[in-house]
Image: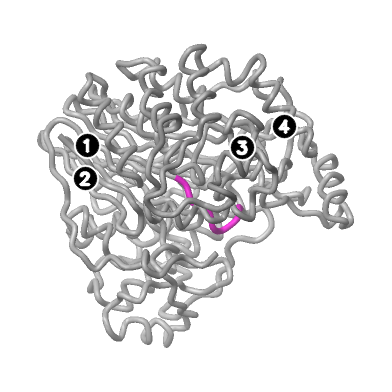
Amino acid sequence: MDPNPDLDRFDSRRSTVYARNGMVATSQPLAAQAGVAALREGGNAFDAAVTTAAALNVVEPMSTGIGGDAFALYRTADGNVGAFRSCGGAPADATLSTVRERVAERSGVDPAGATMPDAGPLAVTVPGTVRGWDRLLADHGNRSLAAALEPAIEYATEGFPVSEVIADMWTVAEALFTEADAREEYLLDGQAPEPGDVMTLPDLGGTLATIATDGADAFYEGPLAEHIAEAVQDRGGLLAVDDLTGFEPEYVDPVSTTYRGAEVYELPPNNQGLIALEALNVAEELDAGSYDYDSAERVHYFAESLKRAFHDGHHYITDPEFEDVPALGSKSYAADRAATVTERAGSVSIGGPGAPPEDSDTVLLTVADEEGNVVSFINSIFGHFGSGVVVPETGITLQNRGSSFSLDPDHPNRIEPGKRPFHTLIPGLCRLDSDDWAAFGVMGGYMQPQGHLQVLANVLDYGMPLQAAMDAPRWRYRADGSLAVEDRFSEGVLPKLARRGHDVVIQPPSAFGGAQITRLADGVISGATEPRKDGTAAGF
């Protein structure tokens, strides 16, 4: 469905938010308030992150849920920088031949020509969210998982009014949900809710209450796990109870680079953080941030940097336990790639077989507290309402992250049992100075590294306040080779880009992702939120 044009304007001015004790920035105000309440009640930034994420599972259910994955980058109060990944892999029975055959059966194509479906039971991978929440709180939080789930359970069982952009996004469910139980859970009289309609999600509330009482293992073992596996297998998928039971989250070493003297941290493969780092390195080599902000040169050189990073990342990034991934984030590699950039737009392909679907949306939240903890956290089911598989009587919508796999046996990102797919999700962390840290991110499939590049450049190259860095017009290189832009660029910029060889197309603001940022510097916390979403930055 086309975006509501009334939601694609943000002419009013917004200011950066400042506070001393704590701050949460995310895409839905009720979820942000739940996180702030956790901080007020003695929780730290990790408690607030999980509390906010759980609330978003309810109030923005098309974007996130316990049937998906969770990721974090963080700086702790004692100065440690860490990365956390709670991301499941393909089912143990998901061999290349088996998936090809099942896709062929469902679509009527030859198995050799089969491609991964964008949705449905074969796109379901093992959900990592619930054990991820539990582990992060046990290792870094002050409060229990049960306490973190309280606001989400209340919103699900007592009801919440639906906000404007989320109501618009909810409409996809009308066509995606064909089964009666899914439609009963997520629609009102067969239709998506309108702004201000009060929704309850009683089955989801009951599932969250079970997890609060019995712990995270209730999701991965016993009756609930059996119910999840049965729902997938009954619809032709491969997920089994053993796949769920065997899942564990992991801490990984972040990857990083420097840009304009700042240290930028990203998640390593199987996530696409290396794309953001390569783009920053190439842009720095080209001195893209030295051009006037309102110039075509600025957009051209940043976009050309990004193109090359995308091309490389979409070919090489996969689960490193199955394939080696080159050092795409190195300065020397960037210098070689920068040498290929000219004053004309380059013909550089992105996407293609083995790359993830281009458009998706999810939730990002950023948190900082007075102790010095700074957290960037992502929770996702990938596409709107994920795979479209809703486990009956649970309210659990399962993710479609498996759609990022390739069925080409020669591609590094080919599906294999237990393998984790190329993951678009990249929370961001930046050290601007010794005691100046920012948690940030930009959601939206292919928009994520592009958004990281643009928001960081706005702050680091052009000195914008945080909210101005969010509000500034964006561009987006697309898989069809076009350069999508918002129509708010300064006069003359777009024709000049076209004369440089860019295929310029204007798209509405809803196509350019959802950013959040929270910054802790000199004992003051500042935050900003995406004007293209319903969200808020809330502090105290």
How crowded is the residue under tag 2: few (<14 C-alpha within 10 Å), some, or many (20+)?
A: many
User: What is the count of numbered marks?
Assistant: 4
Residue in the image at 70% along x and 21% along y: 226
Q: Which residues are magenta?
A: 356-362
Q: Amino acid at mark 4?
A: Ala
Residue 220 is situated, as x and y percent measured from the top left of the image, at 61, 20
On the image, numbered disc 2 is attached to which residue? 527
Tag in front: 4 or 2: 4
Q: Residue at x 77, y 33 (%)?
A: 233
Callout 1, which amino acid? Met
For disc 4, the marked residue is 231
Gap between marks 4 and 3 measured at Cα: 10 Å
Q: Is residue 412 visible?
A: no
Separation of marks 1 and 2 at Cα, in angstroms: 7 Å
Q: Position of residue 363 (x, y in %)?
A: 42, 44
Is residue 103 in view?
yes
Q: Give the percent coordinates (x, y) of residue 72.
A: 41, 34
- In the picture, the disc for residue 23 is 1
Q: Which residue is at the front of the view, 189 or 279?
A: 189
Q: Are marks 1 and 2 in contact (CB under 8 Å)?
A: yes
